[in-house]
Amino acid sequence: MPGKVCVDVPGMPAIGPYSHAVKAGGLLFVSGQPGLDVTTGQASPDTEQQMRQAFLNLDTVLRAGGSSLNDVVNTTAIVPDLANFPLVNQLFAEFFPINPPARMTINAPLPKGLQFSIGCIAALSDA
């Protein structure tokens, strides 16, 4: 395998100058995925829906890169409002029901009124 392979997801525009994910060393490094609807490019005003969409976007990028939610070993989540932390836990339990990955959650502002972003490192399914 070359040193690194960038993964782009057709129909899912990035909101900045970055790759959706990068394959390297048998791992997939996924950029933070916001809760933007891929068809409209907009975030729902509903925080739970926005967070749920971020997990769905993460799943889409993982699949495009040859991995899956089951292969995620580490996540980094950004939450601007810590009052939403119980919702973060609820969604992690839903999307990672068995053997959840390691996780770091950071309280920090996000652009465009976003309420959540999640990135990860996952093992490649074909590695």
Image (cartoon, rainbow, N blue to C red):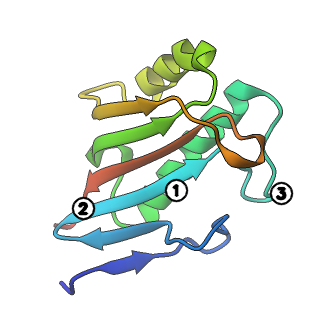
Decide which of tag 2 and tag 1 comes sooner along the chain: 1
Q: Residue at x 83, y 33 (%)?
A: 45
Whether residues under marks 2 and 1 lie with C-beta atoms below 8 angstroms apart, the answer is no
Of residues 98 and 74, the one drawn nearer to the viewer in this rendering: 74
Give the number of the disc on residue 118.
none
Q: Which residue is mark 2?
A: 124
Q: Position of residue 124 (x, y in %)?
A: 24, 61
Q: Does dot 2 land on a helix, a strand or a loop?
A: loop
Decide which of tag 1 and tag 3 comes sooner along the chain: 3
Which residue type does callout 3 highlight? Thr
| Quadrant in which the N terminus is drawn | bottom left
Q: Does dot 3 land on a helix, a strand or a loop?
A: loop
Q: Is residue 54 left or right of residue 45?
A: left
Q: Position of residue 89 (x, y in %)?
A: 46, 18
Q: Residues within 10 Å of mark 2 (few under 14, many from 20)?
A: many
Q: Which residue is mark 3?
A: 40
Marks 3 and 2, how far apart at CA = 30 Å
Q: Is residue 1 left or right of residue 36?
A: left
Give the number of the disc on residue 60.
1
Marks 1 and 3, how far apart at CA = 16 Å
Q: Nearer the viewer, mark 1 or mark 3?
A: 3
| Quadrant in which the C terminus is drawn | bottom left
Decide which of tag 3 and tag 2 comes sooner along the chain: 3
Q: Does dot 1 land on a helix, a strand or a loop?
A: helix
Marks 2 and 1, how far apart at CA = 14 Å
Q: Residues within 10 Å of mark 1 (few under 14, many from 20)?
A: some
Which residue type does callout 1 highlight? Thr
The picture quadrant where one finds residue 110 is top right
